[in-house]
Image (spheres, helix red, strand yellow):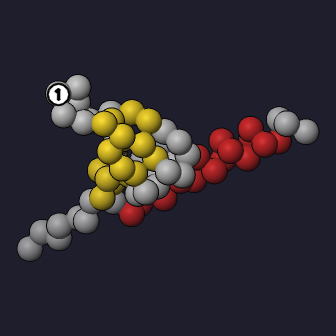
Amino acid sequence: MERKEHLIEVCPVCGSSDIYYEAGGYAGKLYHCKRCGYIGALVVEADSAMIEAIRSEYEKGAASRDAGRD
């Protein structure tokens, strides 16, 4: 029997599931991430491994941006 993956919609930038519709309807869907401020039409349907990979990359990028401010 095949095990079905549990996928959730997350922000493609930071991996947060705390996203909501900014706009929708005729113009298409726009999502807004409460964690990083991303606004865009793309969200990622991800399993737990992919979410962790997205978050890890986001944190590495945030750390390198913070290091450049010194």
Q: Residues within 10 Å of mark 1 (few under 14, many from 20)?
A: few
Specify whether 27 is left or right of 48: left
**Looking at the picture, how far across and down is residue 68, in whole percent?**
83, 35
**Looking at the picture, how far across and down is residue 49, in whole percent?**
41, 60
Residue for point 32% across, 53% down:
9
Specify whether 15 is left or right of 27: right
> What amino acid is labelled 1 in the image?
Tyr
Q: Which of 22/62 is in front?
A: 22
Specify whether 59 is left or right of 63: left
Q: Which of 49/64 is in front?
A: 64
For residue 6, which quarter of the picture?
A: bottom left
Residue for point 32% across, 45% down:
21
Residue receiving disc 1:
26
The correct choice, above or below, for 16 with respect to 3 in the image is above
**Looking at the picture, how far across and down is residue 4, in whole percent?**
17, 67
Q: Which of 4/24 is in front?
A: 24
Q: Quick one: quadrant of the C terminus?
A: top right
